[in-house]
Amino acid sequence: MGYRIRIHHHQHTYTGEVPDDHYILAALEAQGVQLPFSCRNGACTTCAVKIHSGSVRQPEAMGLSAALRRQGYALLCVSFAQSDLVMSTQAEDEVYELQFGRYFGRGRTRWGLPVDEE
């Protein structure tokens, strides 16, 4: 089974058909769509998107917290479509900040907790 995908990326909108058993990024690349990516393993946030409608299955998205997944974020490199989708790419820095921002910019820390100066 395949699903219709629409992705807004900067000033462009890309559309394509994606089989439910192929990663979305790879399927769209095979159709000539060039979207941002880096690791292809679900470990970074380069290929992050915000889902506006539809749903994905992303069991290997270790680079995206469960909280962000619940808010509608997905990693295209390890996501399978479960319905027709409308999505937009996100700035990697924005998703990274949402994911890890609470751990940075607060002085010297270890595992998110303050560390006494030595």
Image: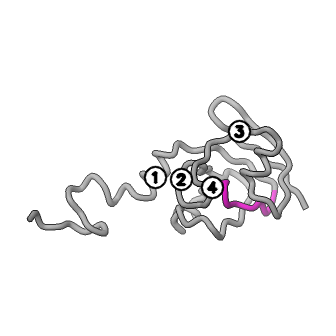
Query: Which image quarter: residue 21?
Result: bottom right
Q: Earlier in the sequence, mark 2 or mark 1?
A: 2
Q: Earlier in the sequence, mark 4 or mark 1?
A: 4
Q: Is 82 one of the magenta-colored residues? A: yes
**What residue sits right under mark 4 in the picture?**
40
Q: Is 50 one of the magenta-colored residues? A: no
Residue at 59 percent of width and 51 percent of height: 48
Image quadrant for the N terminus?
Answer: bottom right
Mark 1 and mark 3 residues within 8 Å of each other at the beta carbon: no
Mark 2 and mark 4 residues within 8 Å of each other at the beta carbon: no
Q: Amino acid at mark 2?
A: Thr
Query: Which image quarter: residue 43?
Result: bottom right
Residue 18 percent across, percent down from the top left: 83, 53
Image quadrant for the C terminus?
Answer: bottom left
Q: Amino acid at mark 1?
A: Tyr
Mark 2 and mark 1 residues within 8 Å of each other at the beta carbon: yes
Name the residue nearer the viewer: 69 or 59. Answer: 59
Residue 97 versus residue 69 in the image, above or below? above
Residue at 63 percent of width and 55 percent of height: 40
Q: Earlier in the sequence, mark 1 or mark 3?
A: 3
**What residue sits right under mark 1 in the picture?**
96
**What residue sits right under mark 3 in the picture?**
34
Q: Amino acid at mark 4?
A: Arg
Residue 116 percent across, percent down from the top left: 12, 67
The magenta span reads 75-83
Residue at 52 percent of width and 42 percent of height: 91
Residue 59 versus residue 104 in the image, above or below? below
Query: Dot 3: what SS?
Result: loop
> In the drawing, what numbered circle is on residue 45?
2
Q: Residues within 10 Å of mark 3 (few under 14, many from 20)?
A: few
